[in-house]
Image: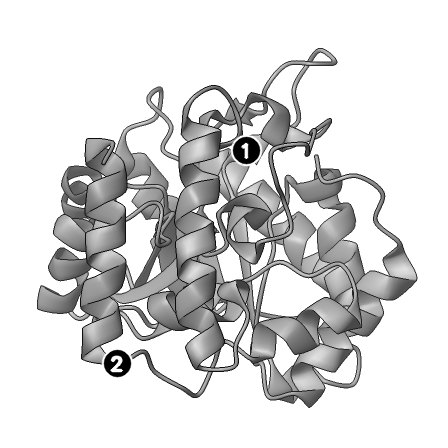
Amino acid sequence: MWGVVDDNESIAAIRQAVDCGVNLIDTAAIYGEGHSEEIVGKAVTGLRDRVVIATKCGLLPPTRRGDLPRRCLSHDSIIRECENSLRRLRVDVIDIYQCHWTDPETPLRETMRAMTTLLDQGKIRTIGVSNFSCEQLATAREFGPVHCVQPHFSILHRRPASDLIPYCQEHDIAVIAYGPLAKGLLTGKFDESSTFQDVRATDPDFTAARYPRNLAIVAKLEEIALRYDKTVAQLALSWVVNHPGVTSAIVGAKRPSQVIENIGGADWTITDNDQQLITRILEEASRGT
């Protein structure tokens, strides 16, 4: 999905992150069909007391090459996935265990029965969900606790700010935002001549009329970032992590140098005036002005 990734660099990136004070590592069983969890397990050897490990269940490998992963949040499948994740991660307990996507074929009552069983058994410490709507989250909470939610949230994808994040604030649920750099679009490293052969090739943000519009937004955001002596990526990360109700953000990194870049998005804030300017830039872009 993301091109060539070197396992040794991935391990080095995780350890660099921990050395820089990052303490949340998020992965999923479906990433590399378990390979990502194995890499995380190797990387945190000797560092277990310094990290919060989050992983996900509910997506199974496709039966045919080229197909999308299969959604499955049945009771038995979740229990089986958790055991496999514990083994690959080389841990006795998973700190945050999350349902990756909803499964329309399995009632949430059954899904939450499995999650609460794992919680009661001490195999997981908290229950999370990812890509759930407010309605789905509310239904899940009827059958057990939900401690955190993982939505797609960035400067370019702000919808959770209107419903999901306020809901989580009201009910004291942590929000772990993913995609804060919009698949690299908010790094400022792309232009009109850029071509994509990975997952971005079919993403609407990188195709047709939306891509030039997004590049224009990024150019204006870069001007704001320069006033803080920051990159546009660091501005985008600061915007997310300091958004009311957001607990933390997941930022991908292939190598240690990218970790250092990402760290620059923490521990500073955007002024109220610039927050308003960012909002105007986004609103004008959405109107085509």
Q: Secondary structure at mark 1?
A: strand
- Which of 83 and 267 lies nearest the eye of the viewer? 267
Q: Nearer the viewer, mark 1 or mark 2?
A: 2
**How many neighbours does mark 2 have within 10 angstroms: few (below 14), some (14-19), or many (20 or more)?**
few
The C terminus is located in which quarter?
Answer: top left
Q: Quadrant of residue 177?
A: bottom left
Q: Which residue is mark 1?
A: 59
Residue beneath the point at 46% across and 25% down: 204
240 left or right of 245 in image: right
Contact, mark 1 vs mark 2 (Cβ under 8 Å): no
Residue beneath the point at 70% across and 34% down: 1
Residue beneath the point at 26% across and 81% down: 271
Say if 256 sits above or below 33 in the image.
Answer: below
- Name, please, the residue furthest toward the top: 64
171 left or right of 27 in image: left
Residue 57 in view (yes/no): yes
Say if 132 sits above or below 260 in the image.
Answer: above
- What amino acid does circle 1 point to? Leu
- Which of 222 and 18 lies nearest the eye of the viewer? 222
Residue 195 horizontal/vertical position (percent): 70, 29
Q: Secondary structure at mark 2?
A: loop
Q: Which mark is residue 192?
A: none
- Name, please, the residue furthest toward the left: 170
Q: Quadrant of residue 268?
A: bottom left
Mark 1 or mark 2: whose residue is earlier in sequence: 1
Residue beneath the point at 30% across and 68% down: 246
Residue 125 in view (yes/no): no
Q: Which residue is mark 2?
A: 271
- What amino acid does circle 2 point to? Thr
